[in-house]
Image (cartoon, helix red, strand yellow):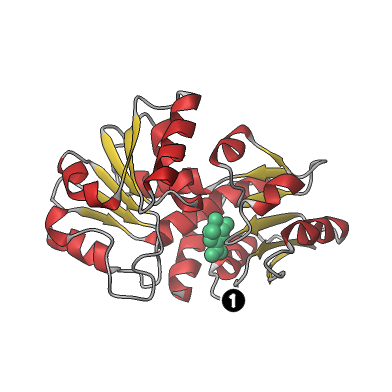
Amino acid sequence: MDVYGLIGNPVEHSLSPPMHEAAYEALDRDARYVTFEPPTDGATDAITSAETLGVAGLNVTVPFKQDVLSAVEPTPLAAQIGAVNTIDFTTEPPTGHNTDAIGAVRALAHHDVTLDGNAVVIGAGGAGRAVAFGLADEGMSVDIANRTVKRAQKLAADINETAVASSVSPSSLDGLPSLLEDADVLVNATSVGMEEDRSPVPANALHADLAVLDAVYSPLSTRLLEDAKAAGATTVDGAWMLLYQGVEAFEFWTDCDPPVEAMNDALRGAL
Ligand code: SKM
């Protein structure tokens, strides 16, 4: 039996176990997906232990995505983003991927959102960095709005340095309404709206020409997505991003065609 899993702290809320186990069942694979919650300073020890115990692959979530970088060989994209969310233990040293970036891109593409033009990404933490790199890599011009402008500036400089994008610029959250006027895509990559009826964006700044992805999936329809719907925008909930980062991880681990529909059904059934 192959063992996969997730490390994070906390992890009990995660929907990855039912999503991945549905994939094993659909493909008749002898595998399990389990969660591990090491102490907040214990990420690298946990990686060493998992490797010793023969774990085949791990997802990594908050707060460990940066910590595990030193315990793996990151792919160039994961190194640029500065965060790993998928570890493959079948290589020596283990490979650290970042599938959050492609997860956001595929979530939008699934909803027929054209990935050219202007994107605004709110948040410059781990998720914001992944989403901004993903969209810039698609050729979008990206504005990063963050409470602390310094972090947004650092992210913009990191992306521009790799020359994947035509332009990436930083802004504070105050600049959001004017940035959104010309935006085609908006992504909330902060935790604002998680288990609360609050949006990071003033409702009157949203418009019908926007596609809005909220990385938050609890609740599934956040205040931001409700306001976006009311403004006539295309909306994409956070479960789509969770689905596609998991689909990509599954593929790295197994080299099999992921059963996307079974994974999506299990995910939505568990919500
Ligand atoms: O990047 C993902 C991670 O792979 C799994 C996850 C979860 O199960 O909640 C959330 C994200 O951090």
Give the residue at x 74% y 64%.
42
Looking at the rendered structure, the kind of residue marked 1 is Glu
Residue receiving disc 1 = 12
How far across and down, in percent of the image, does residue 38 sit?
Answer: 72, 69
Give the residue at x 39% y 63%.
216
Which quadrant contains ligand 1? Answer: bottom right
Determine whether 78 is above or below 63 in the image.
above
How far across and down, in percent of the image, does residue 28 sit?
Answer: 67, 61
Q: If the image is split into quadrants, where does the N terminus sit?
A: bottom right
Front one among 257 and 74: 74
How far across and down, in percent of the image, does residue 151 sit?
Answer: 44, 45
Q: If the image is split into quadrants, where does the C terminus sit?
A: bottom left
User: CB of residue at label 1: within 8 Å of ligand 1?
Assistant: no
Give the residue at x 28% y 52%.
173
Determine whether 13 is above or below 63 in the image.
below
Describe residue 244's horizontal placement relative to residue 200 as left or right: right
- Asked which quadrant contains residue 35, the reply is bottom right
| Label 1 Cα crowd, 10 Å radius (few <14 / some 14-19 / many 20+) | few
Describe residue 133's horizontal placement relative to residue 97 as left or right: left
Determine whether 59 is above or below 112 in the image.
below
Is residue 232 among the parts visible in the rendering? no
SS state under label 1: loop
Task: Single out the residue that lies furthest toward the right.
Answer: 52
How far across and down, in percent of the image, does residue 195 sit?
Answer: 38, 76
- Asked which quadrant contains residue 39, the reply is bottom right
